[in-house]
Image: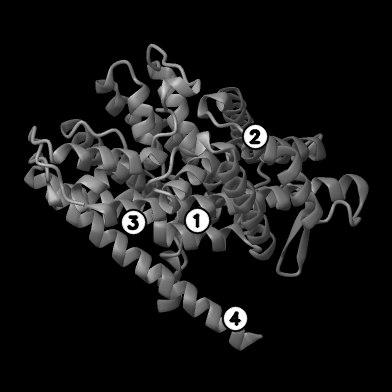
Amino acid sequence: MGIGDGSSNGNQQPVHKEIRDETTPLLPVKVEEDEGFHEFNGASFSGAVFNLSTTIVGAGIMALPASIKMLGIIPGILLIILVALLTEASIDMLVRCSHQGKITSYGWLMGEVFGQWGRIALQASVIINNVGVLIVYMIIIGDVLSGTTSGDVHHRGILEGWFGAHLWNSRAIVLLATALLVFAPLVSFKRLDSLRYTSALSVALAVVFVVITAGIAIIKLFNGTVAMPKLFPELDGLNSIWNLFTAVPVLVTAYICHYNVHSIDNELEDRTQIKPIVRTSLFLCSSVYIATSFFAYLLFGEGTLDDVLANFDANLGIPFSSVFDDIVRVSYAAHVMLVFPIVFFALRLNLDGLLFPTSRHISRDNKRFAIITVSLLAVIYLAAILIPSIWDAFQFTGATAAVLIGFIFPAMVILRDSYGIASKRDKILAVTMIVLAVLSNSVALYSDAMNIFRKKEVA
């Protein structure tokens, strides 16, 4: 499938039509009117910022305090800012190329620039990334409601704390009930717009978590009951240096929103607003990430767990500690439950587009819709039971698909420069992006592999 030359030749029309159809799964909000999907006058600036911010802020916020613990406060915060700047640059590359070529999806852009295999690579990467993210969501819910064990220490979940340990509130049963009673109804919607109210509520719940965490940390800081956190990492050998790189995939995953940028852009009445929208969203999310990482690490110090929510099961050293513990954990678990269907929506559409590129849209085929939905829920549920740590899941998805979606693919698009818009600065930045992404994540994967081997030797 080649790159169109933009001519009016009749032989070129079917090629563009085929690419548009094959990449429809990356455009969940742009569906035919005769199927009951109506147009609107365009999304507002604030609404677009809200939607993009919702895409960004998810489970990644829970693993960031562990990254700060590993890197130290100063390098950790600087790295959060650096990844945000690189994310803005990579999205800008996609948006400029897409506007120049009048392209309305990430997949379509990859198909235009690199042909059919480019589109397939992008869709496969989105599937891998979103499956990883949804597994993490399930793990978080299991940790909060049923508890988690870190080393020899068991952190009680909310249900276990309220009612004691029973079969009915075990991890497997609780996650199964969540999948059937919460996720199944929400992922049954065929329109993304149907989830707008749950999306708004999810953001409000995330803010509750950030405000309470910051408030408790500040109170304890004034009371002098928190230890001085380390500003820089403790390096005692080559292995400790390698381990620092394992934090990079976690940070990368926390900013992946590229697969929703085109959908948000398409809804805007004024498409020139997309760049300030991206900047505003990234600034907002970076502020939330920095505040949460700093205050959570300040609050729990070296006892910060991979999933910081699990830390909220003990006495925080303030009045009504148990009440705040439960509020924090319940609010964020509910937030994750409400974000789940938004990520699932893109996952289902991309999987369908990859498996059935020439079939009619999945929203018109109830049987295919049901089979893919049930199959994905089952796979995610089983994986969440088998994968014990969100750190492991984030390292895998961050070191593979997330890096491709967020940095390598956009850089490759700008280097190919099919639309003649790339400056020398763009190409230097693109090469730098690819080199940093490949080196840092290769080291992270190597470090992860070595850690696994060492654990096996110790065992």
User: CA gap, disc 2 to disc 1?
Assistant: 32 Å
Q: Which badge, 2 or 1, is on the more N-terminal residue?
A: 1
Residue located beneath label 1 in the image: 67
In this view, 102 is above or below 258? above
Sort mark 2 into few (<14), some (14-19) or many (20+) by Cα contacts within 10 Å. Answer: many
**Is residue 71 something one can see in this rendering?**
no
Outermost front residue: 10
Mark 3 vs mark 1: give the one in front: 3
Say how many tags the image has: 4
Sort mark 1 into few (<14), some (14-19) or many (20+) by Cα contacts within 10 Å. Answer: many
Q: Which badge, 4 or 1, is on the more N-terminal residue?
A: 1
User: CA gap, disc 3 to disc 2?
Assistant: 28 Å
Residue located beneath label 4 in the image: 455
SS assignment at label 2: helix
Q: Position of residue 40 (x, y in %)?
A: 42, 13
User: CA gap, disc 2 to disc 4?
Assistant: 40 Å
User: CA gap, disc 3 to disc 4?
Assistant: 34 Å
In this view, 387 is above or below 125? below
Q: Amino acid at mark 2?
A: Leu
Residue located beneath label 3 in the image: 121
Sort mark 4 into few (<14), some (14-19) or many (20+) by Cα contacts within 10 Å. Answer: few
Q: Please name the residue shown 60% across and 84% down the image.
A: 456
As drawn, is 340 to the left or to the right of 122? right
Residue located beneath label 2 in the image: 186
Displayed quadrant of residue 20: top left
Q: Position of residue 437 (x, y in %)?
A: 31, 59
Q: Please name the residue shown 50% across and 46% down the image.
A: 347
Q: Amino acid at mark 3?
A: Ala
Mark 3 vs mark 4: give the one in front: 3
Q: Position of residue 383 (x, y in %)?
A: 63, 61
SS assignment at label 3: helix
Q: Which badge, 3 or 2, is on the more N-terminal residue?
A: 3
